[in-house]
């Protein structure tokens, strides 16, 4: 069997490191062709020494010399730097699939280049579809490129749909842990800090996505992502708060039946399924024990206390570049909250105000998305002060 050559965009993050674990469990099937990171030079160099890729890319050009020095004893590994290098590396001929595990808007451009180069996309960078879902889906269709979801919720929906053909979807049931502040009062949430938000009750993730999970903006982004991945309107997507994180999501069909995917909270499962689909491969790890599991609970989200989720739904209904505006503003407020420059409730307020001030375009092009992103960031930053 010919080994599949994989490029991991964002190999030093949570998804990237777990993907490397999956690859290490199946060395007969998968091989790393390229690894990329934004700033974590030492970890990227360690990964490169372990997996011997053909190339590594550090997005921050100021760290190029440091990375080059760290890999001086690995002459067969080519070292590149910068955003242009990210766009170019995904186009390399030997690559079979690209795992897009970069965080934020930065993942859009290399994903576009990978699709145009006809690479299979294993999508973990949800912002790509949030910002430019219509464009990405059109490109994937034109270039006959499959997009396999890596988010645990979207993988669960995808798995529930396998074998269903054109059967009508009545509703997508998108589950959500509820984050660390699910039971907090408004008064309590007004005083929480980043350290509180970073203590997620179920998942271990990077700082940015963990904060987004606390505000439920992450779930809002997943609603938008689900619309594009599965071709369903917003009114057919229902968010369910499920604190146990055992039911990863479900699909309700036109006959009323519901199919769900269950499992322990382990991101390696959806990563591996995206790599191997339609096969299922063995994976070392914990198994779900239904006999010892606690009861499974489901609640409606509070859209007043968690306004970010409501804003995401609103942006999806308004369409055009509005989700791009929301994403840009969210990246700004998320970073500001992590550096104690804005309160938890104020994040949603700034996003809402940015939505009203930024230039709306109902038929955006790729260039429009870049312009919108820059404008919305400036507006959100000015509102924070």
Image: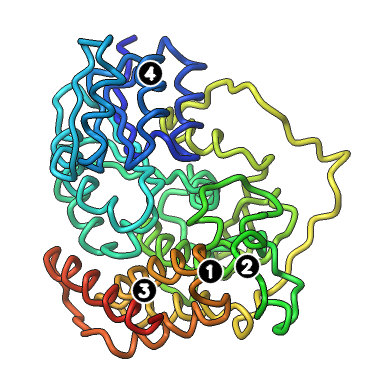
Separation of residues labelled 4 and 1 (CA atoms): 42 Å
Residue at the spot of label 4: 30
Location of residue 187 in the rendering, given as x and y in whole percent from the top left corner: 72, 84
Location of residue 8 in the rendering, given as x and y in whole percent from the top left corner: 34, 33
Question: Which quadrant is the C terminus positioned in?
Answer: bottom left
Q: Residue at x 52, y 44 (%)?
A: 159
Q: Which mark is residue 284?
A: none
Asked if the residues shown at circle 1 and circle 2 are in contact, with their CB atoms under 8 angstroms apart, the answer is yes
Check disc 4: other Cα within 10 Å, few if <14, some if 14-19, many if 20+: many
Q: Is residue 153 left or right of residue 181?
A: left
Location of residue 34 in the rendering, given as x and y in whole percent from the top left corner: 27, 26
Q: Is residue 66 left or right of residue 270?
A: left
Among the two numbered marks 1 and 2 on one chain, the one whose residue lies closer to the N terminus: 2
Q: Which mark is residue 340?
A: 1
Separation of residues labelled 3 and 1 (CA atoms): 16 Å
Separation of residues labelled 2 and 4 (CA atoms): 41 Å
Q: Residue at x 28, y 17 (%)?
A: 71
Q: Nearer the viewer, residue 89 or 197?
A: 197
Q: Is residue 270 above or below residue 243?
A: above
Q: Which mark is residue 329?
A: 3
Figure disc tally: 4
Check disc 1: other Cα within 10 Å, few if <14, some if 14-19, many if 20+: few
Residue 104, by quadrant, is: bottom left
Q: Nearer the viewer, residue 362 or 252?
A: 362
Residue at the spot of label 2: 193
Among the two numbered marks 3 and 1 on one chain, the one whose residue lies closer to the N terminus: 3
Check disc 2: other Cα within 10 Å, few if <14, some if 14-19, many if 20+: some
Location of residue 215 in the rendering, given as x and y in whole percent from the top left corner: 57, 70
Check disc 3: other Cα within 10 Å, few if <14, some if 14-19, many if 20+: many
């Amino acid at each position: 069997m010919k080994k599949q050559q994989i490029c991991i965009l964002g190999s030093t993050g949570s998804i990237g490191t777990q993907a490397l674990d999956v690859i290490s469990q199946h060395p007969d099937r998968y091989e790393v062709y390229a690894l990329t990171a934004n700033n974590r030079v030492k970890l990227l160099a360690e990964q490169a020494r372990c997996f011997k890729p053909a190339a590594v890319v550090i997005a921050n050009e100021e760290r190029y010399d440091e990375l080059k020095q760290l890999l001086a004893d690995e002459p067969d590994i080519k070292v590149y730097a910068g955003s242009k290098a990210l766009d170019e590396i995904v186009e390399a001929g030997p690559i079979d699939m690209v795992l897009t595990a970069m965080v934020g808007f930065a993942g859009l451009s290399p994903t576009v280049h990978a699709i145009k180069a006809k690479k299979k996309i294993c999508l973990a960078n949800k912002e790509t579809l949030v910002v430019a879902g219509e464009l990405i889906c059109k490109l994937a269709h034109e270039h006959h490129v499959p997009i396999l979801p890596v988010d645990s919720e979207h993988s669960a929906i995808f798995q529930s749909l396998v074998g269903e053909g054109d059967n009508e979807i009545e509703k997508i049931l998108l589950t959500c842990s509820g984050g660390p502040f699910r039971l907090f009062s408004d008064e309590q949430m007004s005083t929480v800090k980043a350290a509180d938000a970073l203590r997620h009750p179920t998942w271990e993730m990077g700082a940015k996505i963990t904060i987004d999970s606390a505000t439920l903006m992450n779930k809002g982004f997943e609603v938008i992502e689900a619309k594009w991945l599965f071709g369903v309107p917003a009114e057919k997507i229902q968010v369910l708060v499920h604190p146990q994180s055992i039911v990863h999501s479900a699909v309700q069909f036109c006959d009323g039946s519901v199919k769900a995917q269950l499992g322990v909270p382990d991101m390696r499962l959806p990563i591996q399924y995206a790599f191997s689909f339609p096969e299922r491969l063995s994976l070392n790890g914990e198994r779900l024990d239904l006999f010892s599991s606690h009861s499974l609970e489901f609640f409606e989200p509070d859209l007043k206390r968690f306004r970010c989720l409501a804003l995401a739904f609103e942006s999806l209904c308004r369409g055009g570049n509005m989700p791009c505006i929301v994403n840009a503003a969210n990246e700004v407020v998320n970073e500001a909250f992590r550096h104690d420059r804005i309160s938890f409730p104020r994040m949603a307020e700034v996003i809402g105000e940015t939505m009203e001030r930024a230039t709306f375009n109902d038929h955006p092009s790729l260039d429009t998305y870049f312009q919108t992103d820059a404008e919305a960031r400036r507006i959100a930053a000015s509102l924070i002060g």
